[in-house]
Amino acid sequence: MAAAASDKARFYMEQSVPELQELSTKGIFSGAEITSIAQKRSEFEHMVNMPGASTPTVFARYATYEMNLDTLRKKRSTRLGVKTTTYSGQKKVFNVLERGVKRFQGDMGLWMQYLDFCKHEKANKKLSKALTQCLRLHPLKWELWVWAARHYVESQADMTSGRSFMQRGLRFCKNERNMWLQYAKLEMLYVAKIAARRKILGLDEERKEEVVDDKHDPDADMIALPSVTAEDLAPETEEGTEAVDEKALQKLASTPAQNGAIPEAIMETAMKHFRQDPLLVEQFFDLFTDFADTPCSTRLSKRAMEYLESTQEKKNAKVLLSVCSAKMLLLGVDAQSAEFPVALGKALQQLKSATAADQETQALLASRTIEMFLPYLSQRDEMDEGVKRVFDASVKRSIRTLKTSTTMRGRNPLTELVKRLKSNKKISAELLLEYDLITQEEG
């Protein structure tokens, strides 16, 4: 075994000799550095080829070392004016990672390192092949389907492929709630991008005809001449082009992708599959409100609230409906504006109207109140003193409610809340520390 491992290590080391010679000849690395590189590679090759010592971590460390070495090579080549080299470190990294995923096909960490490197190097053919292999081996990993869909949408602007990955992923991971939510989020991102582009180009503004008041128009008694634009004077403009553009814009504005019909269909299908679970409806509601600037956001948020209204007999539905109603009242209202105290008062009334039947429901209402109000306290320096005191008192009261709540079904509501708050970018660790939600060591 040891002899076979040494033979393999020697084989791969011999392949790298021409590369090291070129690096030494062109003066990119000194003789001592070349020796150090050869020794390091020899150590890694012996470890990855030794059956007992070979682990996914070793392959990951080997690939990271080669990435850092290639980065250093590029920087020195630029500084020394060496334009090109025959050998590329990229090929070496691909070789190490491909051998790693072939040896340890079940290690997702190694697969993700390989996929991320392909994406970073824009090796689209290798990435497509690696994704196909990885998804065949791990079809139940919902994160992988989401990663693939987001890559094609964000990096290659291929929404068709992105939807295809999401739909195929739902066939394997239909019981994974995050899969449904991520699919809806992908569609909302697409709608938001289209809306942003239309706004930049001025296509979202309807053309209005000028209405002239004869009483206030000093030229009303004169002969009106038709207005002439630059387009009318351009002889190269083909007749009918403007009419075609107008029809295309109207058609684009009424497509399902623009009016939010696709995210709505995703939510409705998910509701049928999960039997209209109120907690999942709330997650869809929060997802839609995150895209407040998107034209269809309000309609989709209200559609989610309609589900909560129709399922009030279910547990937690009434409480979550009150929470969502309170969020809708505060949505889009500036915390420094004169209208905010009025909206806050109405939101508090909505929360007070929620009837907490048992201790678990009380803990749910308290945790949602903290999640709703704590981000506002991040900008309290510019906030009205009265509003600040209301937020502070509401958060502290809710924290006391959670601390007195006992662990239910093996879950601690306060611990789960802190985990969610830590992942919220709007809430700082200093704020969590101030309200004793985390310790000094955690902060």
Image (spheres, helix red, strand yellow):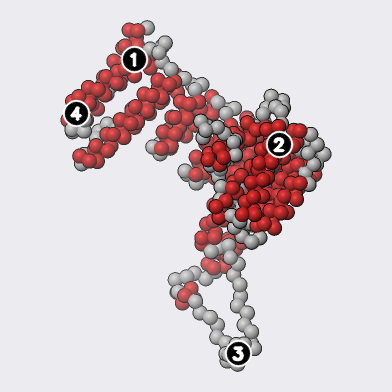
Q: Quadrant of the N terminus?
A: top left
Q: Which residue is mark 2?
A: 401
Q: What residue is pinned by disc 3?
A: 220
Which is more N-terminal, label 4 or label 1?
A: 4
Say which element carries label 2.
Answer: helix
Query: What is the CA distance from the residue labelled 2 to the residue labelled 4?
Result: 66 Å
Q: Secondary structure at mark 1?
A: helix
* Tag 1 and tag 4, C-beta contact below 8 Å: no
Residue at point 40% right, 13% down? Answer: 53
What element does badge 3 sit on? Answer: loop
Residue 119, given in percent of the width and then of the height, sits at: 43, 37
**Counting other residues with Cα less than 10 Å from the Cα at mark 1, is it few (<14), some (14-19), or many (20 or more)?**
some
Q: Determine whether, in the image, residue 330 is placed left or right of residue 193.
A: right
Query: Residue placed at 36% from the left, 15% from the top?
Result: 47
Against 167, is 37 above or below? above
- Residue at 20 percent across and 24 percent down: it is 32
Which is more foreground, mark 4 or mark 3? 4
Can you identify the residue that label 1 sits on?
Answer: 46
Alpha-carbon distance for marks 4 and 3?
Answer: 87 Å
Residue topped by disc 4: 30
Compared with 307, 178 (above or below) is: above
